[in-house]
Image (tube, rainbow, N blue to C red):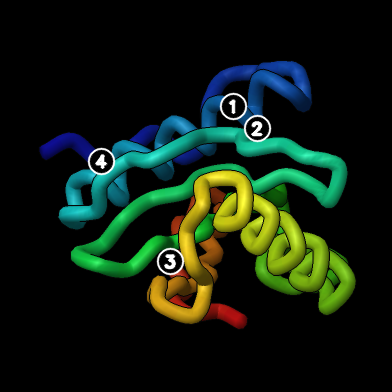
Amino acid sequence: MSQPQLNPPSLSRQSKGQYYEQQTRRFLEQQGLLFVCANYRCRQGEIDLIMREHQTLVFVEVRYRASRDYGGALASVTPAKQQKIRHTARYFLLNQQINEAHQACRFDIVSYDDGQQSWLKNAF
């Protein structure tokens, strides 16, 4: 299994985001998670990746920072951002007619700082 290239060549900000989301999807699939959806958008916000691990839906936020200045990628997932992700996840469940009381869900963060990848399960 090849290790992802964590420092891609010069890309636009949008292309860099797509690059790291693709790297994260591949990585999570290698860990046994199943892909459900990418870049789910609604009025409430956006979720980068939605995956499934056994019976649990996993909502994944992907963050990239070139350096750890100002707290790094993990610190950039503020309480306000977490709230937006939660609202978006609820909307996804409603839209898919999934009863949130009966569906196990988890919120993960996969971050990239200084070329280092980190996967924080059940981040919030």
Q: Is residue 106 above or below residue 88?
A: below
Q: Position of residue 105 (x, y in %)?
A: 45, 72
- The residue that appears at 20% across and 56% down in the rendered structure is 31
**Residue 48 marker:** none
Using the rendered image of the protein, determine whether residue 23 is visible from the camera's viewpoint: yes
CB atoms at circles 1 and 2 under 8 Å apart? yes
**Residue 18 marker:** 1
Which badge, 4 or 3, comes first in the chain's sequence?
4
Disc 3 to disc 2, C-alpha distance: 16 Å
Which badge, 1 or 4, comes first in the chain's sequence?
4
Q: Amino acid at mark 3?
A: Trp
Which badge, 3 or 2, comes first in the chain's sequence?
2
CB atoms at circles 2 and 4 under 8 Å apart? no
**Residue behind mark 2:** 17
Nearest the eye: 82 or 94: 94
**Residue behind mark 4:** 3
Q: Amino acid at mark 4?
A: Gln
CB atoms at circles 3 and 2 under 8 Å apart? no
